[in-house]
Amino acid sequence: MAQIIIKNVRKEFGDFTAVQSSSFTIEDGEFFMLLGPSGCGKTTTLRMIAGLELPTSGEIYIDGEEVGQKPASQRDIAFVFQMFALYPHLNVRGNISYPLISQGMKKAQVKAKVAEVANILGIEDILDTPVGGLSGGDRQRVALGRAIVRDPKCFLMDEPLGALDAEFREHMSEELRALHDRMNATTVYVTHDQLEAMQMGDKIVVMNHGVIEQFGVPQDIYDWPATMFVANFIGSPPMNVLHFDGAVQEGAQAVEFGGARFAIPQQNEGAAGNLVFGVRPEHVTLSDNAPYRGRVEAAEYLGTTQIVTFDTPNGKLKARIDAETIVSPGETTGLAFDPRTVTLFDAASGRALKSHANMGVLGNG
Amino acid sequence: MSFSVTEPSSRTKWFAGTLVILYAIITIMPLLWIVATGFKSPSDAIAYPPKVVFEPTMEGYVNLFTERTRATPEMLEEAGPPETWYDEIVREKGMVISGESRYGQRFLNSVIIGFGSTALCMLLGTAAAYAFSRFRVPLKDDLLFFILSTRMMPPIAVSIPIFLMFRQIGLNDTHLGMILLYTAVNLSLSVWLLKGFIDEIPVEYEEAALIDGYTRMQAFTKVVLPQAATGIASTAIFCLIFAWNEYAFAVLLTSGTAQTAPPFIPTIIGVGGKDWPAVAAGATIFLVPVMVFTILLRKHLLRGITFGAVRK
């Protein structure tokens, strides 16, 4: 297994820049997520690590070796495709043994290796069936089998669960994570599903328009988004963003807008003009005496909690509150925010303002 | 009575079946007529009203494959009793076999040129189609249009320049010349058809093979070719049928060594009276290779023609 270093990698297709100069490091054995909306450059980045696309500039190191301009066949990596890409003219055994045959491995050895992998994935009973009739989950297992059978330096997965039913996806994501933990293999995983990324990843890179927006462990990214894009992309519902005109000084511990004063983490930088107050829905509380008022627009019942949408002077706001609290559309109520989790953004640049709370996270992003 | 939206009613089925059978009869009638004529005697062949029931004879086939001369009764006596069945048929007409006709050789020319140009066309077509489908080729769309545009006029429209060119470079009446010509005519069709088939093969298969340690060429031969077999088979049939049946260029550019069967068959009619059974026999035998080829590949052909129409 191996460490992967991406250094100033850039990819252009004609006039279009798919990936702007990007750098990050994937540690040995990490389950690493490339997250972003479609067209953000995450798949291109993965394909450059694989060697299916060659970077326009920059370097890629796998296990200390610079492979940026090497073809895929010389990189010793395994790739799991979204559509599985099982060879349709071969059966399950044929598919799994294909990469071994290309290495010129002896027949008996191939057989033993395939049996071992089939055992790990629990697909011994379908080894001799054609791949055409398999269910999505079994196809996925075969695709994984083909990937793990040759002990590659790392696994690259391009939305491997994207083609599965929602119900099955849950199950397979657990299986995948368990497989990773057992093999402790460096895995780079592309997804547009933030829940999947949070759930499975050791680390996440959030990309948008070919630019890395943030890089870190899931919790840091959730709690301390570096940009408004990340705040908006991560979380369901995402972070609330209340726009206001005002100013905040370095060292300030509160901001004022909408006729109220809100405590915030101590600021390390000041800003003025069009600012954004970001707070996660679960950190909004209903408080009858609070000066900041919102009118209830709708409530979605989710079992243990409910998502209540408020209309406030600074835009729409969603709160995740206890399902037992009774709210009725049209009523106006006071809103309070947990000051420890607030992030301020500069609306023009979309960048989070540094505070005592997010300093540690934004320092490395 | 049960009613279903997707399942046609028995009356609809009956109607559709009748239509298909009618169409089949209309299409197959001339063929059957040719096959039947091949087994008629010359007088039965031109009888009016046409004979549907007749006494079959191999005369047409014998005449097709032999050269004969008229013999006097003395000469016939001298030659002794006929040795073979075909000798006997010829003797009955007061003739003797003087040699083998050129049909066999012309037929062989058709096989060499037809299958040769089809093979070359598949080789070049698959390679070009793969490149157009997978690589960033500069001016790709213009090139594809240019390739297609070679079929926008009937090929025969350029027959005179081709005739002059062939004469100049010595390709007149050669197998190579005809193979190159038919390949050139068919290539646009094969590139376009095959590009469609290769486009349908997800590129991930090759990428998977590349990652599994294969070179691009190996990925092409081990992954793309087996996948494209259906398309290659159906395209090959189209190319073969054109090259096999082509008449105009064959008349113009071949006369001896490389003459194919289509221009030769009508010449059978020539000597002393109209020998329709021999012509029909020639046409019947001429049908066989394409028929066999098509039947062998028919599974692919059916899938090939409807390929891409249904999402898998």
Image (cartoon, rainbow, N blue to C red):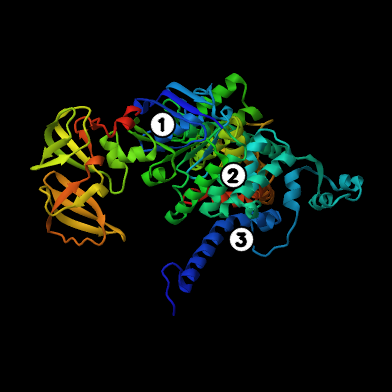
Q: Is residue B246 visible?
A: no
Q: Is residue A51 visible?
A: yes
Which of the 4 quarters of the picture holds residue B271?
top right
Image quadrant where one finds the C terminus of chain A: top left
Compared with A267, A122 (above or below) is below
What is the crowding at mark 2: few (fewer than 14 residues within 10 Å), some, or many (at least 20)?
many
**N-terminal of the two: label 3 or label 1?**
3
What is the crowding at mark 1: few (fewer than 14 residues within 10 Å), some, or many (at least 20)?
few
The residue sitting at the left extreme is: A259
Does dot 3 land on a helix, a strand or a loop?
Answer: loop
Which disc is residue B5 wearing? none
- Pointer 2 with pointer 1, Cβ within 8 A: no
Q: Residue shown at 50%/71% (left/top)?
A: B14
Compared with B105, A281 (above or below) is below
> In the drawing, does residue B232 fall left or right of residue A277?
right
**Number of the front mark, 3 or 2:** 2
User: Which residue is nearer to you in this view: A306 or B150?
Assistant: A306
Q: In the rendered structure, the residue with mark 3 lies on which chain? A: B
Q: Residue shown at 25%/62% (left/top)?
A: A324
> In the drawing, does residue B208 fall left or right of residue A19?
right
What residue is pinned by disc 1? B141
Q: Amino acid at mark 1?
A: Asp
The answer to whether marks 3 and 1 sit on the same chain is yes
Q: Residue shown at 81%/43% (left/top)?
A: B97
What residue is pinned by disc 2? A145
Does dot 1 land on a helix, a strand or a loop?
Answer: helix
Q: Amino acid at mark 2?
A: Gly
Instruction: Tell how many labels.
Output: 3
Q: In the rendered structure, the residue with mark 2 lies on which chain? A: A
Tell me residue A77's x, y (percent).
Answer: 55, 33
What residue is pinned by disc 3? B48
